[in-house]
Image: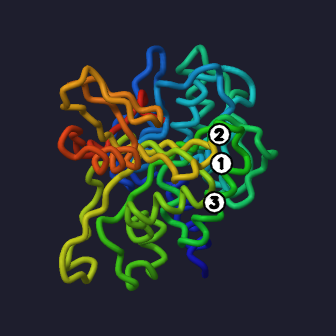
Amino acid sequence: MTYLETAAQFYSQVAQTPEVGLCCVQSTPLQLPGLKIPQPMQEMNYGCGTTVLGELANQPTVLYVGVGGGLEALQFAYFSRRAGAVIAVDPVAEMRQAATRNLEIAAKENPWFDPSFVDIRAGDAFNLPVDDASVDVVAQNCLFNIFEPEDLTRALQEAYRVLKSGGRLQMSDPIATRPIPPHLQQDERLRAMCLSGALTYEEYIQRIIKAGFGQVEIRTRRPYRLLDCQTYNLSEPLLLESLDSVSFKVPIPEDGACIFTGKTAIYAGSEPFFDDGAGHILQRGLPAAVCDKTAAKLAAYMPDEIIITDSTWHYDGGGCC
């Protein structure tokens, strides 16, 4: 049995018998006026963070990969209240059936919601059942991390294919603070449980960029799970973190992709402002959000007059690019 078959079998089981707390979600569902989340959806909230952001506008078409219990599909539908606005794809029949039931309950508890807003389809992350450049947002929560590295690349490339120019890939995945040992990577059930397939932050981001995304924004990065020595046969504990990110389908600049991790640049010189001639103007004493690439260039250019602050691992717009 392959790791994907093991994962399908595992999620078939938890679709039929919900396992509360399976993924140890580190953030509460986005609270929105007039939105009531049915209890069965909360019990099947198999994610490590959130992909639904309050900045959604203009009723975007959303492709949600791995429907789960339907919670985030419902949240996305809150912003796009029209038939078929949210396309939810899942290869597991039992999970699709559970999400359908949960969305019918949601319709009874939320007068604004109609089940037609969410179109649930059979499919997987490697063969998304939509046309090229046809959706505004692709989202996935705690799914891509179960893929082996080359399959992750395939999934990212497929997400890139279906996004419109300027579209967004919104993801939440565990990452590892150091490479996960082979004996855990090869444990198919642990991989299905989102405990052994995580990449390091550096490798995860590089695979996003290699898929073609020119801008990546880190929205949150926080502790997720600790793999202890005794249970997982480790010489020292291994911390997993939860990473929420937004990647944009924009061209990669000649000098490399823009990655925002919450760094700022502060000009401390004698002039009222500093202009680097490349589109970055810093007012004296005022922090300006910059991508990591720009931060490194500014720090090297004027190390005595420009202060670069550390990554906060939170960024929500207003930066240099």
The spot of residue 182 in percent (x, y) is 40, 84
Disc 3, SS:
helix
Would residue 130 be seen by someone viewing this image from the given angle?
Answer: yes
Q: Nearer the viewer, residue 163 or 222?
A: 163
Q: Return the residue at label 2.
A: 100
Mark earlier in primary sequence (2, 3): 2
Q: What amino acid does circle 3 point to?
A: Ala
Q: Which residue is mark 3?
A: 155
Which disc, if any, is residue 213? none
Please indicate whether residue 107 sits to the left or right of residue 10 in the image: right
- Residue hosting label 1: 96
* Quarter holding residue 320: top left
**Residue for point 50% across, 42% down:** 246
Gap between marks 2 and 3, in whole Å? 24 Å
The residue at the point 65 percent across, 27 percent down is 60
Going by the numbered disc 2, the residue's amino acid type is Thr
* Contact check, label 1 and label 3, Cβ < 8 Å: no
Q: Secondary structure under badge 1?
A: helix
Reply above or below: 134 against 115.
Answer: below
Report x, y in % for residue 38. Answer: 48, 31
Quarter of the figure with the N terminus: bottom right
Picture quarter containing residue 217? top left
Identify residue type, mark 1.
Arg
Q: Is residue 44 visible?
A: no
Q: Residue at x 52, y 57 (%)?
A: 143
Q: Nearer the viewer, residue 159 or 304?
A: 304
